Amino acid sequence: MYQDPAGKPFSMEIISFFDFPSVGRVLVELLKRQGIDATYSQPPDMFTRYFAGDYNAAIFGHGGSVRDPFETLRLYQSSSEAIPGGHLVNLARWKNADYDKLVDEVFVTSPEDTAKTKELWLKAMTIWCPSCRMCSSCSSITGCR
């Protein structure tokens, strides 16, 4: 059983919403097999708690695109903010001026220019990935780490 610095057993309440019940249950089982006291719930106030930072683990997702890299890159641009009724938001409030410039360049690059888009994507990932707290698969996708 994992313990905190005071010797108290470590427990992890994982919160989420309707998109992740099967993932949540599997994650809890995997954590329990490793000695972590984990639970999964979908509390009615999940979004309130999530945006207030009132949780110790959450499954949320990021709302990026699998079709257009700009839509994913834009999520982490300094100017991104919550849009009422929308999703675009830089929840981590991460900022990097060089990253922002690359995202602006992707915006004006033709979607048909896949070589230029890939070049800009990889440059952006070399900035973003080293500071990323949410992307364990980053290295397998971009080779950043």
Image (tube, rainbow, N blue to C red):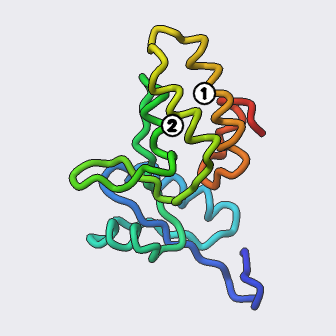
Residue at (73% x, 80% y) in the render: 3
Name the mark on residue 35.
none
Count of marks, rendered view: 2
Q: Rounded to the nearest whole Å, what is the CA distance between mark 1 and mark 2?
A: 8 Å
Residue 76 at x, y = what percent? 51, 46
Considering the numbered disc 2 on the image, is that residue within a helix, a strand or a loop? helix
Q: Earlier in the sequence, mark 1 or mark 2?
A: 2
**62 relative position to 18: left or right:** right
Q: Residues within 10 Å of mark 2 (few under 14, many from 20)?
A: many
Answer with the quarter of the image where residue 12 lies: bottom right
**44 relative position to 30: left or right:** left
Provide the residue designation for mark 2. 73
Residue 5 at x, y = what percent? 77, 85
Up/down of 5 relative to 111, above or below = below
Residue at (45% x, 77% y) in the render: 54
Up/down of 14 relative to 142, above or below = below
Considering the numbered disc 1 on the image, is that residue within a helix, a strand or a loop? helix
Residue 9 at x, y = what percent? 67, 83
Residue 74 at x, y = what percent? 46, 39
Residue placed furthest toward the bottom: 6
User: What amino acid is found at the position of numbered circle 1 in the picture?
Assistant: Trp
Residue at (65% x, 39% y) in the render: 137
Q: Name the quadrant of the N terminus.
A: bottom right
Answer with the quarter of the image where residue 51 lies: bottom left
Q: Name the quadrant of the C terminus.
A: top right
**135 relative position to 66: left or right:** right
User: What amino acid is found at the position of numbered circle 2 in the picture?
Assistant: Leu
Q: Residues within 10 Å of mark 1 (few under 14, many from 20)?
A: many
Provide the residue designation for mark 1. 121
CB of mark 1 within 8 Å of CB of mark 2?
Answer: yes
Up/down of 4 relative to 122, above or below = below
Task: Using the image as rendered, state which of residue 106 and residue 25 is in the foreground.
Answer: 106
